[in-house]
Amino acid sequence: MQWEQVLAHRASRMKASEIRELLKLLDQPDIISFAGGIPDPALFPKAAFAKALADAVEGEAADTALQYSVSEGYAPLRAWLAGEMGKMGVPCTADNILITSGSQQALDYLGKLFLSPGDTALVTWPTYLGALGAFNAYEPRFDQLTPNGNRSAAGYVADAAATGRVKFAYASVDFANPTGETLDLRARNGILNLAEDLDIAVIEDAAYQALRFEGEPLPPILALDCERSGGIEKTRTLYCGTFSKTLAPGLRVGWVCAARDVIQRLVLLKQASDLHSPTLNQMAVEQVARQGFDAQVEKIKKVYKMRRDYMLAALEQHMPDGVRWTRPDGGMFIWLDLPAHLDGAELLAQSLAHERVAFVPGGAFFADGSGANSLRLSFSRMDKVGIDAGIARLGNLLKRVLEG
Amino acid sequence: MQWEQVLAHRASRMKASEIRELLKLLDQPDIISFAGGIPDPALFPKAAFAKALADAVEGEAADTALQYSVSEGYAPLRAWLAGEMGKMGVPCTADNILITSGSQQALDYLGKLFLSPGDTALVTWPTYLGALGAFNAYEPRFDQLTPNGNRSAAGYVADAAATGRVKFAYASVDFANPTGETLDLRARNGILNLAEDLDIAVIEDAAYQALRFEGEPLPPILALDCERSGGIEKTRTLYCGTFSKTLAPGLRVGWVCAARDVIQRLVLLKQASDLHSPTLNQMAVEQVARQGFDAQVEKIKKVYKMRRDYMLAALEQHMPDGVRWTRPDGGMFIWLDLPAHLDGAELLAQSLAHERVAFVPGGAFFADGSGANSLRLSFSRMDKVGIDAGIARLGNLLKRVLEG
């Protein structure tokens, strides 16, 4: 069978990433990996999950936990989330919440809902790799979102006109993957201004929002939109949240919060795509979150903050001149800008071969293929010894490469 | 926000079904429902799941169960499934298996992989409603698959040419949803012949395959294809299985078995759409299946077989002349053909209002909008008393309507 002849057009855009293939090989114990943006399993609330899962399959609860459920998601979890959104300045009800299988699925559904081939998706340069992957399946054109607005709405429209229409602006707002940077209030309002001018949706990726180590929380774009619009039903912003970075990613529970009109459309997509997210997992997450979400978040923030500090100190100590990096207020990532002639992918190959240190080359995060001279480091899974040793080795490599 | 202006073309095809909305209201205790095709929760292997879940979040296993995982799925589950496929005449390895979130997600991914707007998907009239929903998101044209071949391959190609290409034939093979009918060996070979003539893929939906009450099992189309082609890597058939009808649907675990070449493409889609199915759920399903799949299947088949027999006897007793029905060898469904002037949707409204009996009008299962004079009954969740009472009331309604 020659599969190519029966594939959809989109399939030609979906290729295995060489970098992902390379990073798959990183299970060897002697590698120090700053590559994956994944939580430290030592911080999972295991006992709470063990209890919640046991409760969910005990007695009558099991009839619900193991059975088909509604596409919208488990009602008590949606209600709890609506309460949390309220605390962030987004007054809403459970009807404004759709449960998804991680926020990755939310991005897939939003691409599916909004994008026809040739339509334009606005994303930052760089942006979350998984968002590019999710949207890419719907064959859009990507254009550069510049939050502080060095482009006019008319300019975006003119550039999009040949192939489709501008449909949305996507932004990761707090301690973003991959840069670790946070959009300030001006940038958040700037995105909303642009979206109003273009009359498009805003997709707000808040995956890391809860992991703020210091400084005052900023209102989500959706909260600013609620204030401007006079309530969530009039907003244009879709807030995507997840429990992957706070409770545990392996259960795949995330959510979208938005106007009911668009939530109901997403429910139809969800129904046609996987009926619903696992009932059991939603019940377990609801119980663990209700009983101890804030305490769990405090616990992991303490650990990740220390690791960020270790990594910033190690970078200060070991990086040669000409290398710059971000200083995130939270999250899991630090972003390195290298001298323009360096290539992160080449560096990774050398680093794996000679230094046994892994990271993600920055170019992967750019929709236009630029940004080769950058890389992403994650500090979430490594202790002080690993961070110090890994950054020292990486610094040595960069010194050698820069000295030629 | 006027959402219409930013929606993808596909969104106009995805509307809330009036029937689904109607059936949502069926939680009232006085309704006898033959509507949903859902398992009886009394048959869930609850103790086995309680043990498996406890094991999965105990000690070191928890680090795996709660963590991110690979998109292909949990390796021991894939290995177990490869062994099961082998028993059905499909020699294969774990590399031929992708774990999906229920077989509904497999159908979504296959639509996504194969269909560009205007391409043709061949489906039976009637067919599984969820397959129509999943494929519909990718804007195909549907054409009628007639398993015993009363149309030529050239005819299909000619009809498809104006808009796209014929991409696949989809068929539910055993005790199909909605008709309860099984494709005989000739029909299975007929579909494979047609697929070879058209050089297209075959999507084999085997959701109910394990629930055979009587008669000899027939080889899956994929097994016939392996035999013809000389091994799975040369086949054109994608077998979609699920644990929803045997173990429990609420965990959302299904799989696709096919040639590695196409499995690897599906892995890329999975990665971009939800990263992976929940690790915990795959671990629990693997343990429960490995320790007692066959015994569980024997247990539920006994119960469902009795219920099928009750329903067939009740239909015999209560249905007026002019109503015909299928006699399934397994599964969950019986299909009623009504006199041509009757409309299943109108009957449902009357039945809910006056008889308090629910079912699914048959028209929903036809891609071309025909089939109004039919309806689907599920016998999986109702005991003898409920089946007798419900079919008697439905018979009374039909008698009244036919005497008009």
Image: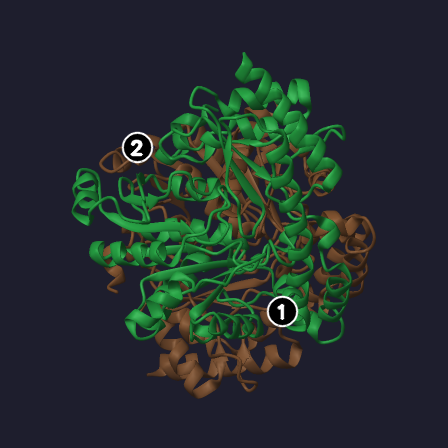
Chain colours: A brown, B green
B57 w.r.t. A390: above or below? above
Give x and y (percent) for residue B308. Answer: 62, 46
Which of the 4 image quarters holds residue B119?
A: top left
At x 20%, y 47%, the residue is B152
Give x and y (percent) for residue B314. Answer: 65, 36
- The kind of residue tagged 1 is Glu
Q: Which mark is residue A157?
A: 2
Question: Which residue reaches farthest top?
Answer: B404
The one nearer the camera, B368 or B9, is B368
A240 w.r.t. B256: above or below? above
* Left or right of A77, for residue A5: left
**Local crowd at mark 2 within 10 Å, few (<14), some, or many (≥20)?**
some
Q: Which mark is residue B286?
A: 1
Asked whether the viewer can see residue B174, the reply is: yes
> Which mark lies nearer to you, 1 or 2?
1
The one nearer the camera, B296 or B133, is B296
At x 67%, y 25%, the residue is B393
Give x and y (percent) for residue A336. Answer: 46, 66
At x 41%, y 64%, the residue is A362
- The kind of residue tagged 2 is Val
- Dot 2 falls on which chain? A
Report helix, strand or loop for mark 2. Answer: helix
Report helix, strand or loop for mark 1. Answer: helix
A90 w.r.t. B301: above or below? above
